[in-house]
Amino acid sequence: MTSSGRWALGLLAAVHLAATAAGFLAPYAPLEQDRMRPWAPPTRIRFVDAEGRFHWRPFVYAAREDEGGPGAYPEDTSRAYPLRFFVAGRLVGVEEPARLFLLGSDGLGRDQLSRLLHGAQVSLAAGLLAAAIALALGWTLGTAAGFHGGWVDAGTMRAADVFLALPWLYLLLGVRAALPLHVPPAQALLMIVAVIGLVDWARPARLVRGVVLSQRERGYVLAARGFGATDLHLVRRHILPHTVPLLLTQAALLVPQYILAEMTLSFLGLGVSEPAPSWGNMLAPLQQYAVLAGYWWMWAPALALVPVFLAYFVLSESLSRST
Protein backbone atom coordinates (compact mmCIF):
# COMPACT_ATOMS: atom_id res chain seq x y z
CA MET A 1 0.00 0.00 0.00
CA THR A 2 1.28 3.47 -0.88
CA SER A 3 1.90 6.21 1.67
CA SER A 4 -1.20 8.08 0.48
CA GLY A 5 -3.22 4.92 0.98
CA ARG A 6 -1.95 4.58 4.53
CA TRP A 7 -2.88 8.20 5.23
CA ALA A 8 -6.35 7.59 3.80
CA LEU A 9 -6.74 4.44 5.87
CA GLY A 10 -5.68 6.33 8.99
CA LEU A 11 -8.19 9.10 8.31
CA LEU A 12 -10.99 6.60 7.77
CA ALA A 13 -10.03 4.76 10.95
CA ALA A 14 -10.16 8.05 12.88
CA VAL A 15 -13.59 8.94 11.42
CA HIS A 16 -15.06 5.54 12.22
CA LEU A 17 -13.51 5.57 15.69
CA ALA A 18 -15.04 9.00 16.34
CA ALA A 19 -18.44 7.68 15.24
CA THR A 20 -18.04 4.64 17.50
CA ALA A 21 -17.15 6.89 20.46
CA ALA A 22 -19.94 9.40 19.74
CA GLY A 23 -21.43 8.97 23.20
CA PHE A 24 -18.13 10.15 24.72
CA LEU A 25 -17.14 12.82 22.20
CA ALA A 26 -20.57 14.45 21.76
CA PRO A 27 -21.27 17.29 24.25
CA TYR A 28 -24.97 16.41 24.43
CA ALA A 29 -27.40 13.61 23.69
CA PRO A 30 -28.51 13.67 20.03
CA LEU A 31 -32.19 14.14 20.95
CA GLU A 32 -31.66 16.77 23.66
CA GLN A 33 -33.47 19.99 22.78
CA ASP A 34 -33.05 23.61 23.86
CA ARG A 35 -36.15 25.33 22.54
CA MET A 36 -34.80 28.69 23.70
CA ARG A 37 -31.90 28.52 21.23
CA PRO A 38 -33.08 27.38 17.78
CA TRP A 39 -30.65 28.02 14.92
CA ALA A 40 -27.96 29.11 17.37
CA PRO A 41 -24.61 29.79 15.63
CA PRO A 42 -21.46 27.90 16.65
CA THR A 43 -20.28 28.79 20.13
CA ARG A 44 -17.07 30.83 20.25
CA ILE A 45 -14.33 29.32 22.40
CA ARG A 46 -12.41 32.13 24.07
CA PHE A 47 -9.18 32.66 25.98
CA VAL A 48 -9.48 36.45 26.36
CA ASP A 49 -12.50 37.95 28.11
CA ALA A 50 -14.36 41.16 27.32
CA GLU A 51 -12.02 43.15 29.56
CA GLY A 52 -8.90 41.93 27.82
CA ARG A 53 -7.75 39.46 30.47
CA PHE A 54 -6.17 36.21 29.32
CA HIS A 55 -7.52 32.93 30.72
CA TRP A 56 -5.41 29.78 30.66
CA ARG A 57 -8.57 27.70 30.62
CA PRO A 58 -10.84 28.06 27.57
CA PHE A 59 -14.30 29.43 28.30
CA VAL A 60 -17.55 30.52 26.66
CA TYR A 61 -20.18 33.13 27.37
CA ALA A 62 -23.87 32.37 27.80
CA ALA A 63 -26.45 33.94 25.51
CA ARG A 64 -28.74 36.66 26.84
CA GLU A 65 -32.14 35.02 26.65
CA ASP A 66 -34.01 38.31 26.85
CA GLU A 67 -32.57 39.46 23.52
CA GLY A 68 -32.13 36.12 21.84
CA GLY A 69 -33.90 35.06 18.72
CA PRO A 70 -33.48 32.75 15.75
CA GLY A 71 -29.92 33.27 14.58
CA ALA A 72 -29.27 36.25 16.91
CA TYR A 73 -27.89 35.44 20.35
CA PRO A 74 -25.91 38.29 21.95
CA GLU A 75 -23.46 37.15 24.60
CA ASP A 76 -23.69 37.93 28.27
CA THR A 77 -20.10 38.93 29.07
CA SER A 78 -20.72 39.37 32.81
CA ARG A 79 -19.62 35.80 33.55
CA ALA A 80 -17.26 33.34 31.91
CA TYR A 81 -18.10 29.62 31.85
CA PRO A 82 -14.92 27.48 31.65
CA LEU A 83 -15.00 24.29 29.63
CA ARG A 84 -15.20 21.18 31.78
CA PHE A 85 -13.41 18.05 30.58
CA PHE A 86 -14.21 14.41 31.36
CA VAL A 87 -17.45 15.20 33.19
CA ALA A 88 -20.50 12.91 33.28
CA GLY A 89 -18.95 10.43 30.88
CA ARG A 90 -18.31 13.04 28.15
CA LEU A 91 -15.13 14.56 26.80
CA VAL A 92 -16.18 18.19 27.22
CA GLY A 93 -19.10 20.16 28.56
CA VAL A 94 -20.00 23.48 30.12
CA GLU A 95 -22.06 24.60 33.06
CA GLU A 96 -25.56 25.82 32.31
CA PRO A 97 -27.02 28.24 31.33
CA ALA A 98 -24.13 28.37 28.87
CA ARG A 99 -24.33 25.97 25.94
CA LEU A 100 -21.53 24.39 23.94
CA PHE A 101 -22.82 24.36 20.37
CA LEU A 102 -19.52 23.85 18.55
CA LEU A 103 -21.34 23.41 15.23
CA GLY A 104 -24.44 25.42 16.10
CA SER A 105 -27.93 24.07 16.68
CA ASP A 106 -30.85 23.13 14.46
CA GLY A 107 -34.41 24.40 14.47
CA LEU A 108 -35.23 22.48 17.66
CA GLY A 109 -32.13 23.64 19.52
CA ARG A 110 -30.33 20.31 19.16
CA ASP A 111 -26.54 20.35 19.06
CA GLN A 112 -25.35 19.78 15.51
CA LEU A 113 -22.01 18.27 16.50
CA SER A 114 -23.66 15.69 18.73
CA ARG A 115 -26.12 14.77 16.01
CA LEU A 116 -23.33 14.70 13.42
CA LEU A 117 -21.33 12.19 15.48
CA HIS A 118 -24.33 10.00 16.26
CA GLY A 119 -25.61 10.32 12.69
CA ALA A 120 -22.24 9.07 11.46
CA GLN A 121 -22.96 5.79 13.21
CA VAL A 122 -26.03 5.32 11.03
CA SER A 123 -24.65 6.51 7.69
CA LEU A 124 -21.22 4.88 7.98
CA ALA A 125 -22.68 1.64 9.30
CA ALA A 126 -25.16 1.58 6.42
CA GLY A 127 -22.33 1.90 3.91
CA LEU A 128 -20.19 -0.77 5.52
CA LEU A 129 -22.98 -3.29 6.07
CA ALA A 130 -24.51 -2.79 2.62
CA ALA A 131 -21.09 -3.22 1.02
CA ALA A 132 -20.55 -6.40 3.03
CA ILE A 133 -23.87 -7.82 1.80
CA ALA A 134 -23.27 -6.82 -1.82
CA LEU A 135 -19.74 -8.22 -1.83
CA ALA A 136 -20.72 -11.44 -0.07
CA LEU A 137 -23.56 -12.05 -2.51
CA GLY A 138 -21.47 -10.97 -5.48
CA TRP A 139 -18.56 -13.18 -4.43
CA THR A 140 -20.82 -16.21 -3.89
CA LEU A 141 -22.62 -15.89 -7.22
CA GLY A 142 -19.52 -14.85 -9.14
CA THR A 143 -17.50 -17.75 -7.75
CA ALA A 144 -20.26 -20.24 -8.53
CA ALA A 145 -20.63 -18.88 -12.07
CA GLY A 146 -16.91 -18.88 -12.81
CA PHE A 147 -16.10 -22.19 -11.15
CA HIS A 148 -18.98 -24.33 -12.43
CA GLY A 149 -19.67 -22.63 -15.77
CA GLY A 150 -22.46 -23.97 -17.96
CA TRP A 151 -26.01 -23.02 -17.11
CA VAL A 152 -24.96 -21.67 -13.71
CA ASP A 153 -22.64 -19.18 -15.39
CA ALA A 154 -25.14 -18.27 -18.10
CA GLY A 155 -28.06 -17.78 -15.72
CA THR A 156 -26.05 -15.75 -13.20
CA MET A 157 -24.53 -13.47 -15.82
CA ARG A 158 -27.87 -12.82 -17.51
CA ALA A 159 -29.33 -11.84 -14.15
CA ALA A 160 -26.30 -9.60 -13.58
CA ASP A 161 -26.86 -7.98 -16.99
CA VAL A 162 -30.42 -7.15 -16.00
CA PHE A 163 -29.33 -5.52 -12.73
CA LEU A 164 -26.53 -3.63 -14.46
CA ALA A 165 -28.90 -2.31 -17.13
CA LEU A 166 -31.30 -0.88 -14.56
CA PRO A 167 -30.61 2.54 -13.01
CA TRP A 168 -29.82 1.23 -9.55
CA LEU A 169 -30.63 4.46 -7.70
CA TYR A 170 -34.15 4.60 -9.15
CA LEU A 171 -34.54 0.88 -8.56
CA LEU A 172 -33.45 1.43 -4.98
CA LEU A 173 -35.97 4.25 -4.55
CA GLY A 174 -38.74 2.12 -6.03
CA VAL A 175 -38.00 -0.90 -3.86
CA ARG A 176 -37.70 1.21 -0.70
CA ALA A 177 -40.91 3.09 -1.50
CA ALA A 178 -42.76 -0.22 -1.75
CA LEU A 179 -41.74 -1.11 1.81
CA PRO A 180 -43.47 0.30 4.92
CA LEU A 181 -42.55 3.93 5.48
CA HIS A 182 -43.28 4.36 9.17
CA VAL A 183 -40.93 1.97 10.92
CA PRO A 184 -38.56 2.38 13.89
CA PRO A 185 -35.09 3.77 13.04
CA ALA A 186 -33.31 0.45 13.66
CA GLN A 187 -35.67 -1.42 11.33
CA ALA A 188 -35.40 1.36 8.75
CA LEU A 189 -31.61 1.07 8.80
CA LEU A 190 -31.74 -2.70 8.39
CA MET A 191 -34.18 -2.39 5.48
CA ILE A 192 -31.96 0.18 3.77
CA VAL A 193 -28.89 -2.00 4.22
CA ALA A 194 -30.68 -5.08 2.89
CA VAL A 195 -32.16 -3.27 -0.10
CA ILE A 196 -28.89 -1.60 -1.11
CA GLY A 197 -26.87 -4.79 -0.67
CA LEU A 198 -29.30 -6.95 -2.63
CA VAL A 199 -29.69 -4.48 -5.49
CA ASP A 200 -26.02 -3.86 -6.33
CA TRP A 201 -24.43 -7.32 -6.32
CA ALA A 202 -23.93 -7.58 -10.09
CA ARG A 203 -20.73 -5.56 -10.51
CA PRO A 204 -18.63 -7.44 -7.95
CA ALA A 205 -20.10 -10.72 -9.20
CA ARG A 206 -18.87 -10.12 -12.75
CA LEU A 207 -15.41 -9.10 -11.53
CA VAL A 208 -15.10 -12.12 -9.25
CA ARG A 209 -16.26 -14.40 -12.07
CA GLY A 210 -13.41 -13.15 -14.25
CA VAL A 211 -10.83 -13.90 -11.57
CA VAL A 212 -12.27 -17.37 -10.92
CA LEU A 213 -12.35 -18.21 -14.63
CA SER A 214 -8.68 -17.36 -14.84
CA GLN A 215 -7.64 -19.20 -11.70
CA ARG A 216 -9.53 -22.44 -12.25
CA GLU A 217 -7.43 -23.24 -15.33
CA ARG A 218 -4.11 -22.72 -13.54
CA GLY A 219 -1.80 -25.70 -13.44
CA TYR A 220 -1.73 -26.00 -9.66
CA VAL A 221 -5.54 -25.99 -9.54
CA LEU A 222 -5.76 -28.71 -12.18
CA ALA A 223 -3.09 -30.69 -10.35
CA ALA A 224 -4.94 -30.41 -7.04
CA ARG A 225 -8.13 -31.55 -8.76
CA GLY A 226 -6.27 -34.49 -10.21
CA PHE A 227 -5.12 -35.50 -6.72
CA GLY A 228 -8.77 -35.64 -5.62
CA ALA A 229 -9.25 -32.22 -4.02
CA THR A 230 -12.88 -31.31 -3.52
CA ASP A 231 -14.48 -28.23 -5.05
CA LEU A 232 -14.72 -26.62 -1.61
CA HIS A 233 -11.01 -27.19 -0.99
CA LEU A 234 -10.10 -25.74 -4.39
CA VAL A 235 -12.17 -22.64 -3.84
CA ARG A 236 -10.99 -22.09 -0.27
CA ARG A 237 -7.33 -22.88 -0.81
CA HIS A 238 -6.50 -21.80 -4.34
CA ILE A 239 -9.17 -19.39 -5.61
CA LEU A 240 -10.43 -17.38 -2.64
CA PRO A 241 -7.02 -15.79 -1.85
CA HIS A 242 -6.86 -14.33 -5.37
CA THR A 243 -10.27 -12.67 -5.01
CA VAL A 244 -9.50 -10.94 -1.68
CA PRO A 245 -7.57 -7.96 -3.21
CA LEU A 246 -10.40 -7.44 -5.68
CA LEU A 247 -12.98 -7.50 -2.89
CA LEU A 248 -11.00 -4.97 -0.82
CA THR A 249 -10.74 -2.61 -3.79
CA GLN A 250 -14.44 -2.98 -4.52
CA ALA A 251 -15.26 -2.33 -0.86
CA ALA A 252 -13.34 0.95 -0.95
CA LEU A 253 -15.35 1.97 -4.02
CA LEU A 254 -18.76 0.77 -2.89
CA VAL A 255 -18.87 1.98 0.72
CA PRO A 256 -19.00 5.72 -0.16
CA GLN A 257 -21.63 5.02 -2.83
CA TYR A 258 -23.80 3.25 -0.29
CA ILE A 259 -23.30 5.99 2.29
CA LEU A 260 -24.57 8.42 -0.32
CA ALA A 261 -27.48 6.10 -1.11
CA GLU A 262 -28.51 5.98 2.55
CA MET A 263 -28.22 9.75 2.79
CA THR A 264 -30.35 10.18 -0.33
CA LEU A 265 -33.11 7.95 1.04
CA SER A 266 -33.06 9.65 4.44
CA PHE A 267 -32.97 13.09 2.81
CA LEU A 268 -36.11 12.21 0.85
CA GLY A 269 -37.85 10.80 3.92
CA LEU A 270 -37.57 7.15 2.83
CA GLY A 271 -34.77 6.16 5.18
CA VAL A 272 -34.01 6.78 8.84
CA SER A 273 -36.54 9.34 10.01
CA GLU A 274 -36.56 11.93 12.75
CA PRO A 275 -35.83 12.20 15.59
CA ALA A 276 -33.00 9.66 15.14
CA PRO A 277 -30.03 11.43 13.50
CA SER A 278 -28.63 10.45 10.13
CA TRP A 279 -26.47 12.52 7.83
CA GLY A 280 -29.28 12.35 5.30
CA ASN A 281 -32.16 13.58 7.46
CA MET A 282 -29.86 16.20 9.02
CA LEU A 283 -29.61 17.75 5.55
CA ALA A 284 -33.39 17.68 5.02
CA PRO A 285 -33.94 21.19 6.53
CA LEU A 286 -31.79 22.58 3.70
CA GLN A 287 -34.79 22.07 1.42
CA GLN A 288 -36.06 25.31 2.95
CA TYR A 289 -34.44 28.32 1.33
CA ALA A 290 -34.28 30.29 4.60
CA VAL A 291 -32.21 27.52 6.20
CA LEU A 292 -30.10 27.01 3.09
CA ALA A 293 -29.16 30.69 2.88
CA GLY A 294 -29.12 31.73 6.52
CA TYR A 295 -27.57 28.95 8.60
CA TRP A 296 -24.34 27.73 7.04
CA TRP A 297 -23.58 25.30 9.87
CA MET A 298 -26.48 23.12 8.73
CA TRP A 299 -24.18 22.05 5.85
CA ALA A 300 -21.95 20.14 8.30
CA PRO A 301 -23.03 16.60 7.21
CA ALA A 302 -22.41 17.43 3.55
CA LEU A 303 -19.00 18.90 4.38
CA ALA A 304 -18.12 15.81 6.42
CA LEU A 305 -18.65 13.70 3.29
CA VAL A 306 -15.81 15.39 1.40
CA PRO A 307 -12.83 14.02 3.38
CA VAL A 308 -14.56 10.65 3.84
CA PHE A 309 -15.21 10.23 0.12
CA LEU A 310 -11.73 11.46 -0.84
CA ALA A 311 -10.13 9.06 1.63
CA TYR A 312 -12.08 6.11 0.22
CA PHE A 313 -11.12 7.14 -3.33
CA VAL A 314 -7.41 7.40 -2.44
CA LEU A 315 -7.60 4.07 -0.61
CA SER A 316 -9.19 2.35 -3.60
CA GLU A 317 -6.51 3.76 -5.91
CA SER A 318 -3.79 2.53 -3.56
CA LEU A 319 -5.33 -0.94 -3.29
CA SER A 320 -5.76 -1.24 -7.05
CA ARG A 321 -2.08 -0.37 -7.60
CA SER A 322 -1.00 -2.92 -5.02
CA THR A 323 -2.83 -5.80 -6.71
Image (cartoon, grey):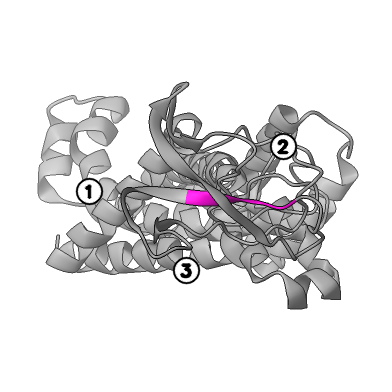
In terms of secondary structure, where does tag 1 sit?
helix
Is 223 magenta? The answer is: no
Q: Residues within 10 Å of mark 3 (few under 14, many from 20)?
A: few
**Residue drawn at (11%, 49%) of the image:** 219
Kind of residue at disc 1: His
x and y percentages locating residue 162 in the rendered image: 68, 61
x and y percentages locating residue 321 in the rendered image: 19, 69
The residue closer to the viewer here, 111 or 312, is: 111
Image height of 204 relative to 309, above or below: above
- The span picked out in magenta is 60-64
The residue closer to the viewer here, 132 or 275, is: 275
Count of all numbered marks drawn on residues in the image? 3
Q: Quadrant of the N terminus?
A: bottom left
**Residue drawn at (29%, 48%) of the image:** 243
Q: What residue is disc 3 on?
A: 306
Q: What residue is disc 2 on?
A: 276
**Dots 1 and 2: beta carbons under 8 Å?**
no
- For the residues labelled 1 and 2, the Cα–Cα distance comes to 41 Å
Quarter assignment of residue 52: bottom left
Q: Earlier in the sequence, mark 2 or mark 3?
A: 2
Q: Residues within 10 Å of mark 1 (few under 14, many from 20)?
A: some
x and y percentages locating residue 184 in the rendered image: 79, 28
Q: Quadrant of the C terminus?
A: bottom left
**Residue drawn at (88%, 40%) of the image:** 181
Q: Earlier in the sequence, mark 1 or mark 2?
A: 1
Kind of residue at disc 3: Val
